[in-house]
Image: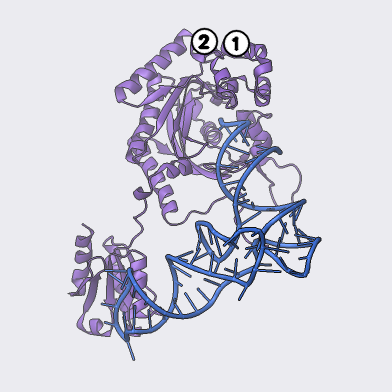
Chain colours: A purple, B blue
Amino acid sequence: MKLTRLRGFQDYLGADARALGMVEDCARAMAYRHALNEIRIPALERIELYERSSGETSDVVQKQLYRVPRASDSPGESDQALRPEGTPGVIRAYLEAGLDRGDPEQRFFYCGPMFRYERPQKGRLRQFNQFGVEIFGRADAACDAELIIMIDEFRRALGLEVRFEVNSLGDGQCRPAFRAALLEWGRAHHAELCADCHQRLEHNPLRLLDCKTDAALAQSAPSGGDYLCAPCRAHFATVERLLGVAGVPYVVNPRLVRGLDYYTRTTFEVISSAVGAQSASVAGGRYDGLVEALGGAAVAGTGFAIGVERTALALAADRHAAGGAPDAAIIAIGEAAIASAIELARELRAGGLRIELLSPDRAVKASFRRADRIGARHALILGDDELRAGVVLMRDLRASAQATLPRGEVAAALAAARG
RNA sequence: GUGAGUGUAGCUCAGCUGGCAGAGCACCGGAUUGUGGCUCCGGUGGUCGAGGGUUCAACUCCCUUCACUCACCCCA
C-alpha cells in the first residue's frame, strides 16, 4: 500500500504553485480596485442548499457531491457536503445575515477550494480553486458589463490571450417559448439526434445546442436570440454597447447556455486555448431568480467564478518561472559564526530582503553549489575571519565577483543589486 | 458511467524477432581542506505497476487487474 494522493487531487510545487499564487494575487488586486468585499464561507454546507439551488435530480447533486458524514461513528445518510461551487453558500450567508431585507445591494468576492466527484481530465480536478464574484441588488445591464470588463482587466494584467463569449438566455417572460421551440425541434429531428441528445431532450433541452457529435445539426436548431422579449433584448443590447465602448474583444455565442431556470439574461464564458477540452477558465452570468428560490426576497444577482487552476494552465511559463529566488544565501562557517549568521539574516530580512540561511553542516563547496541551485543572487560568507573583523564576504554569483563589506553595508548592497 | 492511450531509476525516456537492466538529467563525492555554474572522474539509486499463464529463458508474448493521462458525459 503506497501513500499517494487521491485520484483527482493535485500537489503543486515550485513554479506551478507560484502560478496559482499569481492568479489569486491578480484576482485580489482586481477585486480591490472594483471595491468588492471579501466574504469567507464554510467549505461544508447542508446538502439541502445544493438540492434547492441545482435541483434534487441534477447530475451535480445526484453524482458529483462529496457527501460527508457528521462524524466517523455516525453512519447512514449524510446531510452535509463539501461545496461544489461558491454561489449557493454566498447566497445562504447573505440571507442568514438578513441583507436581502436590510441592505440588499452587496458586492462580494471569495476564493477557495471547491469539490466535485468527477472523472478527472486536463483542467478538471476533484478539488480545484475558484475566485468568485457575486453582486446582489443590481439588475442593470451596466453591472453585467462591468463584471466582464473586470475580467478583461484581470486577464490583461496576467498577459493572457482569451476569447470572451457572451449570450442572453432571456427571462421568465420569453424563455418558456424558446424552450418549447427547442423541444419541438428536437422531437421533429429525433431520428437524427445522438443518444446523448435524446437524454438532453428529456432533462435539459437547452443543452441540445452544444452537442459535439453533430454540431452542424445543432446549428439548425432555433436560436435564442430570436425569442428574446423586448426588455431582454434591450438589456443585452446595452451590455454589448458597453463592452464595445470598453474595447472588450467579445463574440456572441448563441449556443452558450445554462441549464437551470433561475439563470436569466446575460451569460458569459472566457475561453482559453491550451487548456484542453475544459477550456472555460471563467464562467458567469445573471441569476435573478436564485436568491428568491433559496428563500430570500426577490433580489437580482449576477456574478462569475474564475477557475484558478485553468487560468494558471494558460499562463506562459516565463511569467512565473522565476520569482522564488532569494537575494542571498548565507553560508556560516564554524560554530561561532552560526549565531552571528542568524542575526545577520534577521537584519537583512527586516529590510525586506529574501534570505536563506544554509545548513552549517554542509561542506563549503556544497553550500556554494546549493546557493547556486536555489538561484540566490549572492552568497554571504561568514567565518571566523569575517566575524573577527566585523565584515561579510559577499559574492555575486551571477557576476562571479566578490568583495568584503562591513556588515552594516550588506543590506544596501543587496538592495542595490536587485535593480 | 463510456472510450482510447500510457505504465521501465527521483525525473524524461530507450530497450530490435523472447537471451546479462540501459542513457540523459537530477542527487552525493572527488579533481579544488573557505568558492557555485562549465569540464573531467567516480558513486548512490530498479518489485520493469501488480497477479497469473506460455517458455529452457519474459521488460518483451497471452490473460486478468490496478494506476495514470486524454477525450466523451456532466459542468450548478
Q: How far apart are marks 2 and 1 (CA)?
A: 9 Å
Residue A223: x and y in percent read 52, 14
Residue B23 position in % (x across, y down): 48, 67
Q: Nearer the viewer, residue A372 or B40?
A: B40
- Give the amino acid type for the residue marked by disc 1 in the picture: Ala
Q: In which quarter of the image is the N terminus of chain A?
A: bottom right
Marks 2/1 in contact by CB < 8 Å: the verdict is yes
Q: What element carries label 1?
A: helix
User: Mark 2 is on which residue type?
Assistant: Tyr
Label 2 neighbourhood size at 10 Å, few (<14), some (14-19), many (20+)? Answer: some
Task: Judge by depth and name the residue closer to the eye, A43 or A191.
Answer: A191
Q: Where is residue A142 in the image (x, y as percent from the top left)?
A: 37, 21
Q: In this view, does A35 lie above or below A264?
A: below
The correct choice, above or below, for B74 with respect to A123 in the image is: above
Chain assignment, label 1: A
Residue located beneath label 2 in the image: A227
Residue underneath mark 1: A181
Q: What element carries label 2?
A: helix
